[in-house]
Image (cartoon, grey):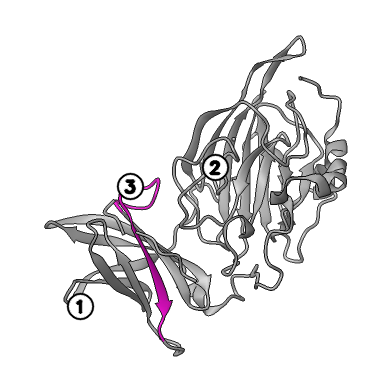
């Protein structure tokens, strides 16, 4: 069922437990973790992990951009179309551009859309209310969103656009430790505890680094599954637990509001500055500049801090993280800890993971 929206103009110092012990404890303790770590999606719903093997709605889902005339002035506008299954969609449009790329963060258009007919070229019709409170209609066809005037004539056309992360494929700098490089020379059995790799060379969820790290810069590339019928925390869920206890959430948050439990959020700590999410099955990046908590005489004297860029867009700016976040394998704050990529019952995949210790 489509969700109706509104259309607008523009997360005691002790290092006694090794990463190996932490990772081994994950499976043992999983039954007692909070419910958000339970099986995420309805097993009856389809889960797509291969962009070449998807439903017909996937070609409609994505980002569209162009301009629209507002009071005689051309105004940039971008839109996200989110597949909800069975030919239904949510549509969100942002005057000024996408979040983090021009949108003011105030007005937006929210609408719903549905395919009309079963023909291969059947149009997807959009209905919603614009920032003035006026009803608006449009159609998605031939690779573009066409927005109509009240009299049914074309107002503007927003072609579909492909956006990629500015840091996708970034090479590890001098001094970096490569954790996973797919078919590259690094053996993941040397860097990760009990890793599982797909037939096409991608790392599967639910792994922990053998080595522990303190102050460091992390680069992680991840791909979320396409689950059109699932919703919220049930849709492509995982997380990057820096030091095993501070989670940067991973979730199919394409087109959502941008909360602390959505992609780019520090879970239970801070919402992202912008929802920079790409559609599921597109490769995404996290670049995390992490400062570990500091301790003196067995007591914490300063909190952890994180700066996070999601797909190259700043989403967390030197945010203080005063406590651990839920469901991580390391139960307390320490000067060092492993990276843990959460098992949440969703088929999240990873590649090109490296870390550069700051000292």
Q: CA distance from mark 2 to mark 1?
A: 40 Å
Q: Is residue 227 left or right of residue 13?
A: left
Q: Where is residue 315? Give x, y as percent.
A: 48, 40
Q: Position of residue 79 (x, y in %)?
A: 37, 61
Q: Earlier in the sequence, mark 3 or mark 2?
A: 3
Q: Nearer the viewer, residue 128 or 343?
A: 128
Disc ID at residue 212:
none
Q: Position of residue 146 (x, y in %)?
A: 29, 72
List the residue tagged with mark 2. Answer: 260
Spatial CA span between label 3 and label 1: 29 Å
Query: According to the image, label 1 marks what residue?
Result: 152
Outermost bottom residue? 119
CA neighbours of label 3 inside 10 A, class few (<14), some (14 to 19), many (20+): some
Q: Left of 144 or right of it: where is 263?
A: right
Residue that badge 3 annotates: 102
Look at the numbered disc 1 and give the secondary structure of its residue: loop
Q: Please tell me which residue lies in front, 166 or 41.
A: 41
Specify start and end residues of the magenta stretch as a single range: 95-116
Q: Can I make out residue 215 in this image?
A: yes
């Amino acid at each position: 069922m489509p969700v109706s929206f509104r259309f607008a103009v523009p997360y005691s110092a002790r290092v006694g437990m090794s990463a190996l012990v932490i990772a081994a404890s994950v499976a043992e303790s999983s039954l007692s973790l909070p419910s958000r770590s339970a099986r995420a999606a309805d097993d009856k719903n389809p889960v797509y992990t291969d962009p070449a093997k998807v439903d017909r709605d996937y070609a409609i889902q994505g980002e569209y951009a162009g301009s629209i005339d507002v009071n005689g002035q051309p105004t940039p506008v971008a839109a996200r179309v989110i597949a909800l299954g069975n030919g239904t969609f949510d549509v969100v449009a942002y005057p000024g551009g996408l979040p983090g790329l021009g949108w003011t963060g105030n007005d937006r258009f929210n609408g719903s859309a549905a395919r009309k007919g079963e023909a291969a070229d059947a149009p997807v019709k959009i209905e919603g209310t614009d920032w003035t409170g006026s009803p608006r209609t449009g159609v998605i066809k031939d690779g573009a969103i066409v927005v109509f005037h009240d009299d049914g004539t074309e107002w503007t056309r927003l072609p579909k656009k492909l956006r990629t992360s500015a840091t996708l494929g970034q090479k590890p700098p001098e001094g970096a430790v490569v954790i996973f490089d797919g078919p590259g020379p690094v053996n993941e059995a040397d860097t990760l505890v009990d890793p599982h790799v797909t037939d096409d060379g991608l790392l599967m969820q639910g792994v922990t680094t053998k080595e522990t790290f303190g102050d460091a810069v992390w680069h992680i590339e991840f791909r979320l599954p396409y689950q059109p019928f699932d919703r919220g925390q049930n849709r492509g869920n995982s997380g990057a637990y820096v030091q095993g206890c501070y989670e940067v959430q991973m979730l199919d948050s394409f087109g959502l509001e941008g909360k602390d439990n959505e992609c780019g959020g520090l879970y239970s700590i801070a919402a992202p500055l912008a929802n920079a999410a790409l559609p599921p099955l597109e490769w995404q990046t996290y670049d995390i500049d992490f400062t570990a908590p500091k301790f003196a005489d067995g007591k914490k004297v300063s909190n952890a801090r994180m700066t996070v860029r999601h797909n190259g867009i700043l989403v967390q700016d030197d945010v203080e993280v005063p406590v651990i976040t839920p469901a991580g394998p390391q139960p307390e704050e320490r000067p060092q800890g492993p990276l843990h990529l959460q098992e949440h019952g969703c088929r999240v995949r990873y590649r090109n993971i490296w870390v550069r210790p700051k000292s």
